[in-house]
Amino acid sequence: METPRLPLLTVFGLGRLRPAPGTWGSMPPVVLAAVLIAAGIAPGSGWFEAALLAVMLVFSGACIAQGDLAEAVFGKKDHGSIVADETAGQCVTLLFLSLLPEAALATPLATANTLLLSFLAFRAMDIVKPWPADRTQKLAAGWGVLIDDLFAGFYAFLIVLGASHIGLG
């Protein structure tokens, strides 16, 4: 049973969805980015980054502040239902979209492809956890839940940046 203070950690229940709760938890920032872009709030506008940064900070803060409580409630450190870390990590990838070549966001199709690549690259990096992300899971409480996903978000951005420079993003 979920305590009233844990909805942020499960991203309002997305972490309870199966299969692949981390995939569900990674979706809200991508949907937010798509909605912002469709509304004319483009990467580099400041508003785009402020919205994603706010989401990242809220869910990062939830991981840090409620890590011990979540461990007690779920019976393990990084239970699959905790997906706030994925939400925060996906934001990292999207925060840097303004650094991509202009072609990556030039048309609706290019934007959709870039957002899809951002999502897939993040999921891959979150699952693989390249060094040093794999080491950070040993950190105490919520820090160990969160930091590897922030690394994954940065690694994913590097993949998107590289792909966009060779015309794949």
Image (cartoon, grey):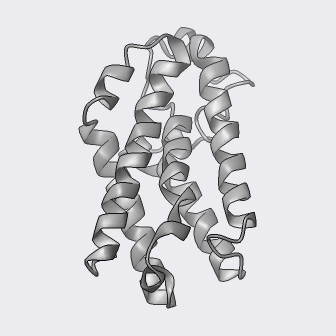
Where residue 24 appears, as percent x and y from the top left, is 47, 50
**Image position of 101 (left or right of 6):** left
The residue at the point 72 percent across, 80 percent down is 39
Residue at 69% in and 65% down:
48
The mark tally for this picture is: 0
Residue furthest to the bottom in view is 107
Q: Is residue 18 visible?
A: no
Compare residues 105 and 100 and report the one nearer the observer.
100
Up the image or down, 79 lies above or below 52; here it is above
Q: Residue at x 34, y 41 (%)?
A: 126
63 or 165, which lies in front?
165
Q: Is residue 131 visible?
A: yes
Q: Is residue 6 above or below residue 30?
A: above
In the picture, residue 104 is in which quadrant?
bottom left
Residue nearer the viewer, 28 or 124? 124
Horizontal and vertical percent for residue 81? 48, 32
Establish if 44 lies above or below 13.
below
- Above or below for 139 versus 60: above
Residue 20 in percent (x, y) is at 36, 45
* Picture quadrant where residue 128 is located: top left
**x and y, in percent, of residue 162 in the image:** 29, 66
Where residue 158 sits, quadrant-wise, is bottom left
Position of the N terminus, as image quadrant, is top right
In which quadrant of the rendered image does the C terminus lie? bottom left
For residue 109, side relative to residue 50 (left or right)? left
